[in-house]
Image: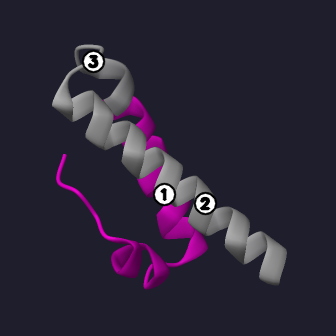
């Protein structure tokens, strides 16, 4: 899974973010714990959750 920047997340719709969140969560669950891929997937999950929370707070 490639890293996605915060700018990439801002440009996506909330529905797209929820789909990406599901994919990132599954990727984090399927890779070896403690690996770089797991760290990156978890960082993406956290970034998406943050972006969705910001949208919920500001709307």
Q: Where residue 12 sits: x, y (%)?
A: 45, 78
Q: Is residue 50 magenta?
A: no
Residue 7 found in image quarter? bottom left
**Numbered label attached to residue 47:** 1
Q: Residue at x 20, y 33 (%)?
A: 37
Which residue matches tag 3?
34
Residue 41 found in image quarter? top left
| Residue 59 visible in the picture | no
Q: Earlier in the sequence, mark 2 or mark 3?
A: 3
- Classify the position of the C terminus by image quarter: bottom right
Cβ atoms under marks 2 and 3 closer than 8 Å = no
Of the pair 33 and 17, the residue shown nearer to us: 33
The relative height of residue 8 versus residue 47 in the rendered view (above or below) is below
Dominant SS in magenta: helix
Q: CA distance from mark 1 to mark 2?
A: 5 Å
Q: CA distance from mark 1 to mark 3?
A: 19 Å
Q: Residue at x 48, y 67 (%)?
A: 16
Q: Secondary structure at mark 3?
A: loop
Q: Is residue 19 left or right of residue 37?
A: right
Q: Where residue 43 sits: x, y (%)?
A: 39, 46
Region rendered in magenta = 1-27
Q: Secondary structure at mark 1?
A: helix
Q: Secondary structure at mark 2?
A: helix
Q: Where residue 57 sits: x, y (%)?
A: 82, 73
Q: Is residue 52 left or right of residue 43?
A: right
Cβ atoms under marks 1 and 2 closer than 8 Å = yes
The relative height of residue 4 versus residue 58 in the rendered view (above or below) is above
Crowding near pointer 1: few (<14 within 10 Å), some, many (20+)? some
């Amino acid at each position: 899974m490639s890293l996605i920047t915060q700018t990439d997340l801002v440009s996506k719709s909330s529905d797209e973010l929820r789909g990406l969140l599901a994919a990132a969560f599954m990727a984090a669950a399927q890779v070896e714990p403690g690996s770089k891929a797991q760290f990156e997937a978890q960082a993406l999950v956290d970034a998406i959750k943050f972006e969705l929370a910001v949208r919920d707070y500001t709307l």
